[in-house]
Structures are given as structure tokens and as C-alpha cells.
Amino acid sequence: MLLDKGADVNAQSGVYGTAMYAASSIGHDQAVQMLLDKGADVNARGGRFGNALQAASGEGHDQVVRMLLDKGADINAQGGFHGNALQAASERGHDQVVQMLLDKGADVNAQGGEYGNAL
């Protein structure tokens, strides 16, 4: 409704940074799909984890992770608490998401974040 009235799908503000980040972090796949359909930037940064892919990965939302990757999310994007999506999924013990990220080409040696690397 708000988007139909001209709200900016990529607006930045608040704790989550963007609507895409917020929807991804709670695993709301219907909201994520709607935002994608409205042109949301899958690589926009914002929030504690850095971007939507990192947030979804850290919370183990495999369906949302898949959706974001299918829309071109940068699997090795750096930023936020965990550094990247693989580090977020690894640190939180989300094996299914870790495997998905590895299958899609995540850099196992990427450095960054509070823990340094995925290992």
C-alpha cells in the first residue's frame, strides 16, 4: 500500500536500515518477494549485519537467502558485525545456509567482522 503511494522501496533509516533488511532478518519471504518485485536493492547496506543477505544468513532463513541470491545479492559483500553472509551463517550454526552459500561460491577465506573469518 505504501509503495503504491510512492514510498521509496530503498529508503534508509532506523535500526534495520532498509525494509529489505528488516523483512530478510525476520524471514518474511512474502514481504521480501514484494520488495524485490518493487525494485528493492538486494545489496543495500544497513542494519547490524550489513545487508539483507547477511541478516537472513545469520538468522538461518534459507528461503530468503535463496531468493536474495537468485536476484543477484553479492554473496561475498563485506560489512556489519559478521563481515559477510558465510561468517554470519557459520557463527550462528546454520549448516543448511552455510552449504547453500558454499555451493553458490562464497569465499571460505574471506576476512572481516568481529570474528575474522568463517572458521
Image (spheres, helix red, strand yellow):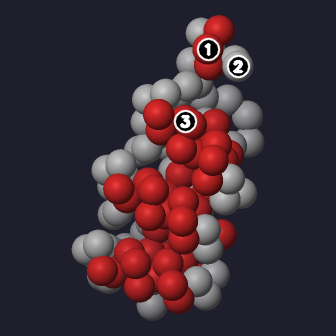
Q: Nearer the viewer, residue 62 or 50?
A: 62
Circle 2 residues within 10 Å: few <14, some 14–19, many ≥20: few
Say what amino acid the circle numbered 3 marks: Leu
* Residue 1's disc number: 2
Residue 49 at what x, y percent from top left? 59, 58
**Is any atom of residue 90 visible in this view?**
no
Give the residue drawn at x 58%, y 45%.
32
Placement of the N terminus among the 4 image quadrants: top right
Circle 2 SS class: loop
Cα–Cα gap, marks 3 and 1: 12 Å
**Label 1 sits on residue:** 4
Give the residue drawn at x 55%, y 25%.
9
Circle 3 SS class: helix
Say what amino acid the circle numbered 1 marks: Asp
**Is any atom of residue 93 visible in this view?**
yes
* Residue 61's disc number: none
Pointers 1 and 2 in contact (CB under 8 A)? Answer: yes
Give the residue drawn at x 49%, y 63%.
65
Q: Is residue 31 left or right of residue 105?
A: right
Residue 28 at what x, y percent from top left? 68, 53
Q: Is residue 101 left or right of residue 8?
A: left
Say what amino acid the circle numbered 2 marks: Met
Cα–Cα gap, marks 1 and 2: 5 Å
Cα–Cα gap, marks 3 and 2: 12 Å
Circle 1 SS class: helix
> Residue 42 sits in which quadrant?
top left
* Residue 35's disc number: 3
